[in-house]
Image (cartoon, rainbow, N blue to C red):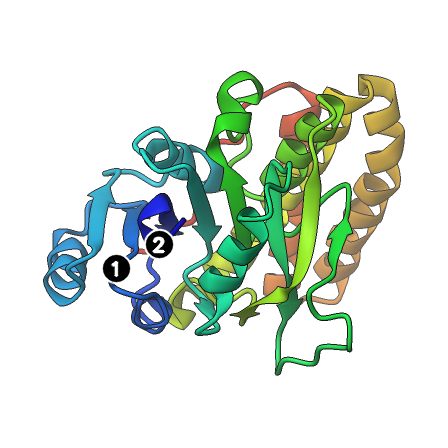
Amino acid sequence: MTNKDLTIIITTFRSEDNIEKCLNSIDNSTKVIVVENSNNKIFKKNIENKFSNVECILTNDNLGYGKANNIALKKVETSYSLILNPDATLDKNAIGNFFTIVNKNLDFSIIAPLQYKKEFHLGNNYSELIETDKVEGFAMFLNMKKFFQIGFFDENFFLYLEEIDLCKRIKNKNGKIYIAQSIKIFHMGASSVNKIFSKQVELTRNWHWMWSLFYYNKKHLNFYYALMLVLPILFSSSFKVLFYSIFPKAHKKEIYLKRISGLINSILGRASWYRPSLD
């Protein structure tokens, strides 16, 4: 098997600052689908002109991580795909090492790398595969044939826990998930979006982390377990809103108001509707 058997999928949103570094780390013989969560035609034109192996799809709206990835996954015609964050870069041997593993006829649904944030440090057993229950979503190789029954990402999630939910569903079907120490992918973390939007992105993350936390636990356990889990967070956030009203720090107060809103909306069964204002 070769790079022709792999499609790389990158979901972006205002990621102009780092997407080119990511794409430059990918061999141009590998097909890449970039799904941009906007109607940014200039972004699409620039990326497709500069990288001949890249197809850029504009969603015309901010659909979130899972739904945008699903758009690309439904277009994949190769045996394997790699879900990759735009702030991640591949080591030159990453894809080759993936196919070295695949060529051993390993039964797997997902293979992920170890996450290296600063530099690569590998022990003597660098080729060892570690079976696990879940992996981080910044880079995941998917065995496409394993997902016909499982499905891809739950599109009710807008942000956070989508990959954990996917892993949970795989394990419920007795699927295999591995971390491969020989696959090296560098991940900056929390830097996919242009820094000028950092305040709105922080508010969005706080809202959706709370929404997703309740929804995930309700889905896989039950409503009352999820409620008991989040009630201390709800009380703590309410106290901090009161505290920052008496001792004013507007941004801190806004963060905790977003946490409360995310939790209440999820508890009431409302969709994950909140979106950042980036005008």
Is residue 78 depicted above or below 240 in this figure? above
Could you say where residue 104 lies in the image, as x and y percent from the top left? 60, 48
Is residue 17 depicted above or below 228 in this figure? below
Residue 24's image quarter?
bottom left
Is residue 52 depicted above or below 231 in this figure? below
Residue at left 31%, top 66%? 27
Residue at left 18%, top 61%? 47
Look at label 1 and name its amino acid.
Ser
175, 278: nearer the viewer: 175
**Residue 274 visible, this orientation:** no
Earlier-in-chain disc, 1 versus 2? 2
Q: Are marks 1 and 2 in contact (CB under 8 Å)?
A: yes
Q: What's the CA distance linking mark 1 and mark 2?
A: 7 Å
Residue 134's image quarter?
top right
Per the image, the residue denoted by label 1 is 29
**Residue 241 visible, this orientation:** yes
Apparent side of residue 112 relative to residue 43 in the rendered image (left or right): right
Instruction: Give me the disc on residue 197.
Output: none
Could you say where residue 165 lies in the image, as x and y percent from the top left? 66, 33
Secondary structure found at label 1: loop
Secondary structure found at label 2: helix
Per the image, the residue denoted by label 2 is 3
Local crowd size for mark 1, using a 10 Å CA cut-off: few (<14), some (14–19), many (≥20): few
Look at label 2 and name its amino acid.
Asn
Apparent side of residue 112 relative to residue 80 in the rendered image (left or right): right
Residue 254's image quarter?
bottom right
Could you say where residue 270 lies in the image, as x and y percent from the top left? 58, 21
Quadrant assignment for the C terminus: bottom left
Q: Which residue of the protein is positioned furthest toward the front in this rendering?
A: 104
Residue at left 77%, top 48%? 237
Residue at left 45%, top 70%? 89
184, 269: nearer the viewer: 184
